[in-house]
Image (cartoon, helix red, strand yellow):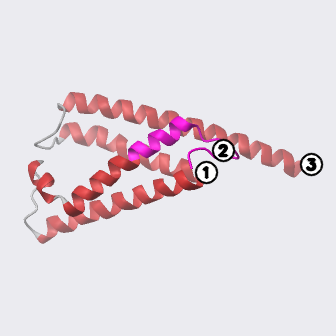
């Protein structure tokens, strides 16, 4: 599961992806089943429109987690790029949103939260570059075989 000999996705990229999946699954659990955690964070859960938004966030996060699990299983570098790209965009937006609009029970100050996200996005970008190089190498090998 962690390393397919044909694609050679680095183990550290898979570990990063597993950690991100675990975070997303935790978020999905919170959105669907642990509304007390949302209340503790200062998010109101007292109306149908708010529940609609919360469940939509849960559904979207679940889809991202499912896609990430899929690429962990298949180890397809092209598919991995799509998931990593989505992770970079999501975490990049959170890097700005979380410090500007912190939740009531945030485990870190807005400044610390910003720098934590900078580190996470940097790691994700490095993972994207590593997988992109694999895709380019595979594409060059395919072109060379096609030319023969």
Real-space Cα distance between discs 2 and 1?
A: 6 Å
How would you rate the neighbour count of disc 3 (Cα within 10 Å): few for under 14, some for 14-19, many for 20 or more?
few
Of residues 70 and 144, the one drawn nearer to the viewer in this rendering: 70
Give whichever of discs 1 and 3 has the lower sequence position: 1
**Residue 12 shown in magenta:** yes
Q: Quadrant of residue 113?
A: top left
* Residue behind mark 1: 78
Q: Is residue 18 left or right of residue 138?
A: left
Q: Identify the residue at the far bottom of this view.
A: 48
Q: Quadrant of residue 7?
A: top right
* Residue behind mark 3: 148
> Residue visible at 9% across and 49% down?
40
As drawn, the label of residue 11 is: none
Q: Position of residue 89 (x, y in %)?
A: 40, 45
* Residue behind mark 2: 135
Magenta range is 1-20
> Residue visible at 45% across and 39% down?
16
Q: Are marks 2 and 1 in contact (CB under 8 Å)?
A: yes
């Amino acid at each position: 599961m962690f390393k397919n000999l044909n694609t050679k996705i680095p183990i550290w990229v898979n570990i990063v992806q597993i950690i991100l999946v675990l975070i997303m699954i935790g978020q999905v659990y919170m959105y669907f089943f642990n509304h007390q955690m949302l209340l503790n964070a200062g998010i109101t859960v007292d109306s149908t429109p708010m529940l609609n938004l919360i469940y939509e966030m849960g559904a979207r996060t679940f889809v991202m987690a499912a896609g990430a699990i899929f690429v962990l299983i298949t180890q397809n570098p092209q598919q991995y790029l799509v998931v990593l790209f989505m992770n970079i965009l999501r975490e990049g937006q959170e890097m700005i949103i979380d410090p500007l609009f912190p939740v009531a029970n945030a485990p870190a100050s807005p400044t610390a939260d910003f720098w934590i996200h900078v580190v996470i996005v940097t790691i994700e970008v490095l993972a994207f570059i590593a997988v992109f190089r694999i895709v380019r190498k595979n594409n060059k090998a395919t072109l060379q075989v096609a030319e023969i």
